[in-house]
Amino acid sequence: MRGWTTYATVLAPPHEPMRPSWLCAQDGMAWPCGVARTQLAASVHPADLGTTLVAQLERAARDMPDSTPDELYERFIAWTLEPAC
């Protein structure tokens, strides 16, 4: 069942950020939302995922100057370090 969920999520419309708010264009959640995280993990080589997200974090930091470094880290990077279920 896990494979089906991942497969179905990858085929869903991409969950892209709307700038400068960095909310998901599909569901209005803080980007990267849960679906975007799944899509990113499935479409970006694991070795490149961190680099990709750091680049997005840097853009978001410019767009959202009131966000703290800790908030941005939790939102963009921390989830990549969690063990897979």
Image: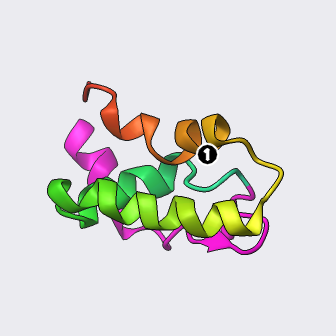
Task: Judge from the rendering whether residue 44 lies leftward or rightward of residue 68; answer left or right.
Answer: left
Left or right: 33, with 1 as reference point: right
Q: Is residue 26 above or below residue 6?
A: below
- Work out whether 34 lies above or below 54: above
> Was residue 54 drawn as part of the magenta stretch in this picture?
no
Taking depth in this image into account, of 52 and 45 the one nearest to the observer is 52
Q: Who is closer to the viewer here, 42 or 79?
A: 79
Q: Which residues are magenta?
A: 1-28
* Position in image of residue 66 (x %, y %): 83, 51
Residue 18 falls inside the magenta stretch: yes
State the residue at coordinates (69%, 51%): 30
In the image: residue 61, left or right of residue 43? right
Q: In front: 32, or 61? A: 61
Q: Find the residue positioned furthest to the right.
A: 66
SS at badge 1: helix
Identify residue for label 1: 72
Q: Position of residue 36 (x, y in %)?
A: 48, 57
Check disc 1 and give the amino acid type.
Leu
Quarter of the image for residue 82 reads top left
Question: In this orientation, which residue lies closer to the viewer: 7 or 55?
Answer: 55
Colouring scheme, one of rainbow, by chain, secondary structure, one colour: rainbow
Quadrant where the N terminus is found in the figure: top left
Q: Residue at x 71, y 51 (%)?
A: 29
Residue at coordinates 55% horizontally, 36% vertically from top-left?
A: 74
Mark 1 is surrounded, within 10 Å at the Cα level, by few (under 14), some (14 to 19) or many (20 or more) other residues, namely: some
Residue 69 % position (x, y)? 63, 42
Quadrant position of the C terminus in the picture: top left
